[in-house]
């Protein structure tokens, strides 16, 4: 672990990370099937760190909003657990890495409609369905929660849902709809499949900057305490981080743990949220992805940052 005497200030380290990791070519890929994510500038790169002592450091394109996509699954899970009766949710979704792609249908069929974990699409659909029992517009609830953590409660500021992008993605959501119908058939979805997928896709289409995502994730580094009080209990915060470590990076959770040594959750918009328990929450964003769907430059930057700072759970 770095000490105050032998380490440069965090802001200086972040500037250096941006200099070294901002992509210089269009290496990597963009997601298929989500039209609005098909042509982002390849050289976008931002990073932000929100600390438990209340400081926020950032560099590069850290204030440019991007599509958080599957990072939203961390927040909807926390909201579902924080609302009480976690056992009801855990009877409907497991906590095992899936070993298959995030939107696979095969495993769900073989395993009788119980998704492996809340971060694959089938699991996230169950979480959304669970949230919809309390509030039919679950995506708006997730947005409200995020705005509260970030400290923006005014219209036109802070996180927002890109409704146009959500609409376009919905028109290409045959696979997510198929997953939802499978879940319905197995008795593991209570709301209509179409409504659940709509809420899920709108939640994925939330736009936030690295600075905002880092602030929003800070409760996980603070035993569940967020900007507006308790989000989840300390034990639930620990468990969410555990699921991030084992299931947060698609089919590359092992490789990410090996390189970075921290719980993380990535989205196909190129963002990655990483938690250093007790220390800080980090968000990096760069849109081009590796073969597993994780930000190419973002993953490399986090490995570098972890090595330089000693931030790791190991
Ligand atoms: N909205 C995307 C989907 O459901 C999310 C993908 C992701 O970021 O993992 O396919």
Image (tube, helix red, strand yellow):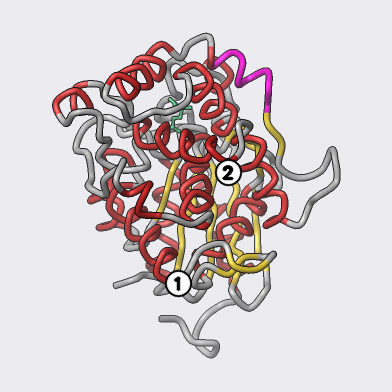
Quadrant showing the C terminus: bottom left
Res 116 quadrant in image: top left
- Mark 1: give few (<14), some (14-19) or many (20+) Cα within 10 Å: some
Res 58 quadrant in image: bottom right
Magenta segment: does it hold 166? yes
Residue at the outermost left position:
110
Magenta segment: does it hold 41? no
Q: Which of 27 and 58 is in front in this view?
A: 58
- Mark 2: give few (<14), some (14-19) or many (20+) Cα within 10 Å: many
Res 235 quadrant in image: bottom left
Residue 177 at x, y percent in the picture: 41, 16
Kindly identify which residue carries mark 2. 45
Instruction: Kindly identify the residue that appears in the image at 29 percent across and 19 percent down.
Output: 185
Q: Nearer the viewer, residue 101 or 64?
A: 101
Label 1 element class = helix
Name the side, left or right, on which 65 lies relative to 196: right
Q: Nearer the viewer, residue 33 or 91?
A: 91
Residue 232 at x, y percent in the picture: 51, 63
Name the side, left or right, on which 76 lies relative to 66: left
Stretch in magenta: 162-169
Name the side, left or right, on which 6 lies relative to 124: right
Q: Is residue 285 above or below residue 151?
A: above
Q: Nearer the viewer, residue 174 or 38?
A: 174
Q: Mark 2 or mark 1: which comes first in sequence?
A: 2
Instruction: Kindly identify the residue that appears in the image at 49 percent across and 37 percent down.
Output: 270
Q: Which of marks 2 and 1 is in front?
A: 1
How far, Cα to Cα, is label 2 from label 1? 32 Å
Query: Magenta region's main secondary structure?
Result: helix
Label 2 element class = loop
CB contact under 8 Å: marks 2 and 1 = no
Kindly identify which residue carries mark 1. 234
Mark sitting on residue 85: none
């Amino acid at each position: 672990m770095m000490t105050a005497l032998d380490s440069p200030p965090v802001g200086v380290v972040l500037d250096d990370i941006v200099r070294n990791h901002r992509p210089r070519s269009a290496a990597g890929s963009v997601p298929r099937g989500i039209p609005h994510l098909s042509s982002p500038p390849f050289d976008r790169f931002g990073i932000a760190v929100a600390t438990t002592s209340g400081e926020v450091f950032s560099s590069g394109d850290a204030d440019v909003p991007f599509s958080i996509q599957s990072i939203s699954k961390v927040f909807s899970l926390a909201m579902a657990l924080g609302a009480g009766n976690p056992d009801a949710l855990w009877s409907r979704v497991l906590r095992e890495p899936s070993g298959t792609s995030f939107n696979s249908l095969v495993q769900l069929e073989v395993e009788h409609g119980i998704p492996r974990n809340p971060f694959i699409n089938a699991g996230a659909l169950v979480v959304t369905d669970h949230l919809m029992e309390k509030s039919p517009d679950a995506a708006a609830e997730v947005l409200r929660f995020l705005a509260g953590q970030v400290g923006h409660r005014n219209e036109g500021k802070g996180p927002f849902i890109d409704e146009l992008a959500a609409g376009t993605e919905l028109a290409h959501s045959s696979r997510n709809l198929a997953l939802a119908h499978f879940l319905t058939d197995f008795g593991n979805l209570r709301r209509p499949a179409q409504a659940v997928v709509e809420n899920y896709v709108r939640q994925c289409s939330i736009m936030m900057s690295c600075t905002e995502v880092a602030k929003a994730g800070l409760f996980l580094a603070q035993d569940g305490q967020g900007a507006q009080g308790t989000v989840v209990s300390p034990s639930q915060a620990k468990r969410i981080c555990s699921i991030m470590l084992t299931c947060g990076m698609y089919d590359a959770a092992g490789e990410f743990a090996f390189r970075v040594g921290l719980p993380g959750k990535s989205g196909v918009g190129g963002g990655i949220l990483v938690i250093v328990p007790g220390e800080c929450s980090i968000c990096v964003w760069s849109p081009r992805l590796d073969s597993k769907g994780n930000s190419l430059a973002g993953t490399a930057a986090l490995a570098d940052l972890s090595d330089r700072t000693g931030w790791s759970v190991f």
